[in-house]
Amino acid sequence: MTSDFEYRARPGNLALSATAFGVLVLLTAFLWQSVPGLVLLLLIPALCVCFWQIVVTPVYGLHLSPECWHIFEGPRDRSLPARSIAHLRVCDRDGPTRCTIVMTDGTEVKLHHMAVPDPTVLIREATNRGVPVREG
């Protein structure tokens, strides 16, 4: 068993997006010989939008190590020192699981719902690292 735990999730499907981009590139190259105006008007902007969505789609998740907890939330990535975490609050009633990391100074760090793995896995990994878990 390693002392690190990592969970990452990405909305959508990267393989499907990359396949759609590849097919769109092939269609653009094929149609360039016969209808360059249509390619310039429709397919080039579609290629740009498809590529942009692949690049800017955020990755959510957690990387838990003995020294630090890294929270991946797209543009708002954070690192929290493990020694300053008071407890983890998990509320899995009333719909999707909501998790909050409570720091020793009282501040609360809410986790995005996509950044949280299965609650039992998160509870096991937190308790393995000495962080108490409370129901909220």
Image (tube, rainbow, N blue to C red):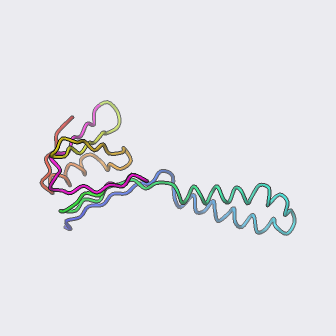
Count of residue discs: 0
* Residue sitting at x 81%, y 67%: 32
Judge by depth and name the residue closer to the eye, 74 or 107.
Answer: 107
- The chief SS type of the magenta part is strand
Quadrant location of the N terminus in the rendered image: bottom left
Q: Nearer the viewer, residue 124 or 70?
A: 70
Is 56 a magenta residue? Answer: no
Q: Residue at x 22, y 62 (%)?
A: 65
Task: Using the rendered view, name the quadrant where residue 59 is placed.
Answer: bottom left
Indicate the position of residue 111 as horizontal and vertical percent values: 32, 45
Residue at the location (59% across, 58% down)?
52
Q: Height in image: 52 above or below 108?
A: below
Measuring from the top left, give residue 135's x and y in whole percent. Answer: 19, 37
Residue at the front extreme, as displayed: 105
Residue 99: give x, y in percent of width and height: 28, 42
Vertical placement of residue 44 versus 127, above or below: below
Residue 123 picture location, percent across and down: 20, 48
Residue 87 image-quadrant placement = top left
Q: Is residue 41 left or right of residue 106?
A: right
Q: Is residue 78 left or right of residue 43?
A: left
Question: Along the horizontal axis of the image, is 60 left or right of 134?
Answer: right
Image quadrant occupied by the C terminus? top left
Q: Is residue 130 left or right of residue 13?
A: left
Is 87 contained in the magenta span? yes
Please name whichever residue, 19 or 55, is drawn nearer the observer in this view of the structure.
55
Q: Which residues are magenta?
A: 71-93
Q: Residue furthest top?
A: 94
Q: Residue at x 51, y 51 (%)?
A: 12
